[in-house]
Amino acid sequence: MTNLLLVEDDPDLAGNIIDYLELEELYCDHASNGMAALQLLQSGCYGVVILDINLPQLDGLSVCQRLREQGNDTPVIMLTARDQLDDKLTGFARGADDYLVKPFAMAELVARVQVLALRRSGQIKQLSSGPVTLNVTQRQAFINEKPVKLSPTVLIILEQLLRATPQPVSRDSLEQAIWGDERPDSNSLKVHMHHLRKALSVQDSVSVVSQPGAGFRLLLQVGEHG
Amino acid sequence: MTNLLLVEDDPDLAGNIIDYLELEELYCDHASNGMAALQLLQSGCYGVVILDINLPQLDGLSVCQRLREQGNDTPVIMLTARDQLDDKLTGFARGADDYLVKPFAMAELVARVQVLALRRSGQIKQLSSGPVTLNVTQRQAFINEKPVKLSPTVLIILEQLLRATPQPVSRDSLEQAIWGDERPDSNSLKVHMHHLRKALSVQDSVSVVSQPGAGFRLLLQVGEHG
DNA sequence: TAGCGCTTTAACCCTGCTTTAACCGCACCT
DNA sequence: AGGTGCGGTTAAAGCAGGGTTAAAGCGCTA
């Protein structure tokens, strides 16, 4: 799956990075200027962006800033030869998640990319929020340490909600997670959501709320802790 | 709020870091050995862990690894004097989210801590002006820290106004933001604007004023009276 | 092949958002 | 003074979307 975007105008370095990423079975799209990068990022479907700062047309700092202004929080790792503290702070201030100074070891870039990519959809096999926990590999949910039987689809929904919490998950990404691109045309999602709510209703400190315009999110009632 | 944990056995460095974090209004708990750190982390209520590698009893790499094995995905930033590539890769392999080589600039540590802390708690995309704040991702507005229910359309208007403040926003760009190019032919915008004004009227230091020819803008009153 | 559980479909309700339309009042112009 | 345009207000109609429920389809296993 190609959910990386590399933005780098130096063809040699770009080629290098692409080759190295491929060895790690990471595949990426490539943009060689800032405007093109922003264009590609509009789709919002990249997991991580590797962003050079020196770019023609629109520099990396501006690309990152505009991205954030648009409400896009795709993780960004900035690449640059500038190693002064101020440069780094500027990068972070514009919304970067990581900052790597050239020349860098390819292995380190890959490690950092993987950290950013995995944290969202990750390697952790136990997710929890309040009294609800989910063992991702066993596909088994627990409420108050007691196992609860949930259907596969409902488990997918719960997993998405737990990963995002306390952020909401859009209807669209839920449907994407369940059916990919072959979505049913009925209100199936509503029904599954209803099943999840019913399962969660056996206790009262966690619930699913719908946020008009944003989707659904887990709500942890006060008086509890994760 | 103290949701940082600093794990560092050198008392001088620890004191330094704690002092510097306090200047940035970040407050942290402190552990001086690995076992104590793991103990504290059991509670699972830390937002970020700053973890030295060289520690008595249980080194930082092991602390991080055990944390992950327990299914705890609290962001970890590792500190160490070891700057070889292999050391870094080991750190990431054990589950670190970031890796900072000593000596480092305090400002960079703070920047990286903030990135890790904010990304998780979803505070990144907040706009605010006076007593009004808007969590963009959760589509949730607050007045004086109290949540206020606003309709999706009104939220869009508020977002535009907050982004532009103190500049005005033209009618046209508001309509663009709400409906794109398929705009209703009635005075719908006026009505939504009215709803927003009514919502803002519960307090009196922020209001929406119309700027002839320019559109609307948020107005922040200064002072209580006179 | 019968039964079971999961998923999908369809029909329905209801809340509250969005739109519509009509009205008010003010400023400006003729 | 009266007309016109613009912004603001209000109430009501229409509708979309979320939530619920029951039943039909489907695949699996016993």
Image (cartoon, coloured by chain):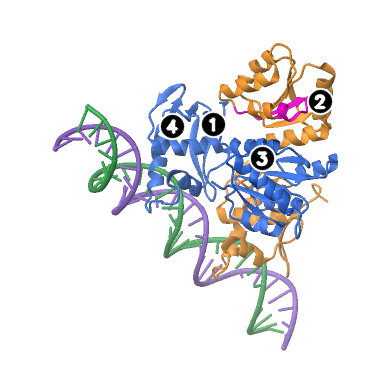
Chain colours: A blue, B orange, C purple, D green
Q: Nearer the viewer, mark 4 or mark 1?
A: 4
**Residue B87 lies within the magenta run:** yes
Amino acid carrying mark 4 in the image? Leu
Q: Is residue A135 left or right of residue A68?
A: left
In the rendered image, residues at marks 1 and 2 fall on the same chain: no
**Residue A97 lies within the magenta run:** no
Mark 3 neighbour class, 10 Å CA radius: few under 14, some 14 to 19, many 20 or more: some
On the question of residue B91 being in view, the answer is yes
* Image quadrant containing the C terminus of chain A: top right
In whole angstroms, how far apart are the C-alphas of marks 1 and 3?
19 Å
Give the extent of the magenta segment: B73-88
Q: Which residue is mark 3?
A: B123
Q: Chain of mark 1?
A: A
Which of these two is toward me, A143 or B208? A143
x, y percent for residue B109? 78, 32
Q: In which quadrant of the rendered view does residue A102 lie? A: top right
Judge whether A117 appears above or below D14 on screen: above
In whole angstroms, how far apart are the C-alphas of marks 4 and 1?
13 Å
Residue drawn 39% across the image and 32% down it: A150
Q: Which mark is residue A221?
A: 1
Q: Nearer the viewer, mark 1 or mark 2?
A: 2
Mark 4 neighbour class, 10 Å CA radius: few under 14, some 14 to 19, many 20 or more: some
x, y percent for residue B18? 80, 24
In whole angstroms, how far apart are the C-alphas of marks 1 and 2?
34 Å
Q: Which residue is mark 2?
A: B17
Residue drawn 80% across the image and 41% down it: A88
Q: Which residue is mark 4?
A: A200
x, y percent for residue A167? 58, 40
Q: Chain of mark 4?
A: A
On the question of residue B196 being in view, the answer is no
